Image (cartoon, rainbow, N blue to C red):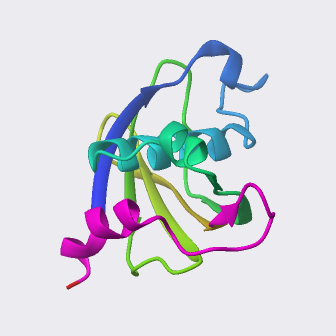
Amino acid sequence: MYRSETTVRVRYGETDQMGFVYYGFYAMYYEVGRVESLRQLGLSYKELEESGVMMPVLENKSKYLSPALYDDELKIVTTIREKPSVKITFEYEIFNGSGKLIHQGETLLAFVNKATGKPCRPPEHFQHVLKPYFG
C-alpha cells in the first residue's frame, strides 16, 4: 500500500453562495492528490503522457461528511491499496485544518496507449517505483 499527503487552500472561487466548497471541485482536489502522490514517487503525469500513456478516469466516487469553507487549508491523503494492472484505484481522505475528516473519495483510472487508444499495462518505470509498496 502506498500513501501520500498534500495540502491545498480553498480559494474563494471554489465556494458556492453558502460559502461551502462547490461539490464539483472535489474532483479537482482528487487530481491534485493524485498528481502530487505520483510526483512524490518521482513520477509525473507529463512524463507519462510524453511516453505515450494516458490515464483517463473511469469512475469517480465522493462522500461528503462536512463542508469545506473558503480559506480552509485541506490535507488530502491519497492511498493506492492495490498494485496497479491496466487499472489503478486511488482513494482520498480530505481533512480540514482541525484534522477533522470531511470528505472521502475514490477514482478508478485506466492506463491507455495514446497511439492506439487501447488499455495497456503501466510503463516499466511506473511499476518499478511502486513495487516496494506491494511486496
Residue 92 position in % (x across, y down) = 47, 58
Query: Would you identify the image quadrant in which residue 29 lies?
Result: top right
| Quadrant containing the C terminus in the rendered view | bottom left
Q: Residue furthest top?
A: 12
Residue plotted at (63% across, 51% down): 52
Residue plotted at (65% across, 61% down): 62
Residue plotted at (65% across, 33% down): 21
Q: Horizontally, is 111 left or right of 40 in the view?
A: right
Residue 98 position in % (x across, y down) = 30, 38
**Count of numbered circles in the view:** 0
Q: Horizontally, is 105 left or right of 34 in the view?
A: right
Q: Residue furthest bottom?
A: 135
| Quadrant containing the N terminus in the rendered view | bottom left
Query: Would you identify the image quadrant in which residue 119 lies?
Result: bottom right
Residue 26 position in % (x across, y down) = 63, 44
Q: Is residue 73 visible?
A: no
Q: Which residues are magenta?
A: 111-134
The foreground one among 132 and 16 is 132
Q: Horizontally, is 21 left or right of 36 in the view?
A: right
* In the image, residue 122 above or below residue 15: below
The foreground one among 91 and 122 is 122
Q: Is residue 31 visible?
A: yes
Residue 125 position in % (x across, y down) = 35, 60
Residue plotted at (28% across, 44% down): 40
